[in-house]
C-alpha cells in the first residue's frame, strides 16, 4: 500500500494533483482500494495502478496535442 504522497513522488507530480484525481473522476473506481489510517489515505496496488494509468494516459494525449500544435506553428502542412 502507498500513500498519495508516495504515488505523487513516483509520478513527479504534486500530492494535490493525485488527490484531486482520486477524489474526482477516479473516486468510484479507486474507492474500494483505499482506506484511511490515522488521517493518512492509503491505496492498495490496484488503486495505485488506476491512478498511474490515468496520469500516463493524460500525458500521452497532451504530448500528441503539443506535437500537432508544434507542427502547425512551424508551418508544416498536416495531412
Image: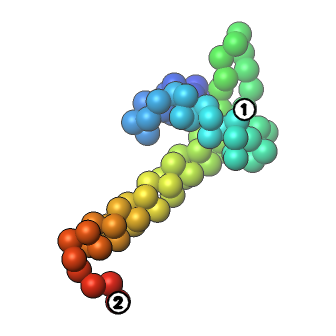
Eyeballing the image, is 46 above or below 61? above
Residue 23, by quadrant, is: top right
Query: Could you classify mark 1 by the number of other residues whose Cα lies within 10 Å: few (under 14), some (14-19), or many (20 or more)?
Result: some
Q: Are marks 2 and 1 in contact (CB under 8 Å)?
A: no
Q: Position of residue 75 (x, y in %)?
A: 22, 77
Q: Is residue 46 above or below residue 65?
A: above
* Residue 34: image tag: 1
Q: Secondary structure at mark 1?
A: strand
Q: Is residue 61 left or right of residue 66?
A: right
Q: Residue furthest left?
A: 74
Q: Is residue 63 above or below residue 33?
A: below
* Residue on which the image places disc 2: 79
Q: Quadrant of residue 73?
A: bottom left
- Which residue is pictured at 44% across the width and 35% down the height? 13
Query: Residue 22 location, x and y as percent?
Result: 66, 38
Judged from this view, the residue extending furthest toward the bottom is 79
Query: Can the viewer see residue 30?
Result: no
User: How far apart are the two marked residues, 2 and 1, measured between alpha carbons?
Assistant: 46 Å
Q: Residue at x 70, y 47 (%)?
A: 25
Observer able to see residue 25: yes
Q: Tell me which residue sits at (65%, 17%) in the image.
A: 40
Q: Quadrant of the C terminus?
A: bottom left
Q: Does 71 sit left or right of 11 as displayed?
A: left
Residue 74 occupies quadrant: bottom left
Q: How is the image coloured?
A: rainbow
Label 2 or label 1, whichever lies nearer to me, is 2
- Pick the front one: 70 or 48: 70
Does residue 57 appear to the left or right of 32 in the view shown? left
Q: Earlier in the sequence, mark 2 or mark 1?
A: 1
Q: Badge 2: few (under 14), some or many (20 or more) residues near its Cα, within 10 Å?
A: few
Amino acid at each position: 500500500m502507498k500513500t498519495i504522497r508516495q504515488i505523487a513522488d513516483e509520478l513527479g507530480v504534486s500530492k494535490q494533483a493525485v488527490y484531486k484525481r482520486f477524489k474526482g473522476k477516479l473516486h468510484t473506481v479507486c474507492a474500494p482500494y483505499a482506506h484511511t489510517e490515522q488521517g493518512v489515505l492509503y491505496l492498495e496496488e490496484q488503486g495505485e495502478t488506476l491512478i498511474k494509468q490515468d496520469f500516463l494516459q493524460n500525458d500521452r494525449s497532451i504530448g500528441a496535442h503539443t506535437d500537432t500544435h508544434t507542427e502547425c506553428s512551424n508551418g508544416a502542412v498536416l495531412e
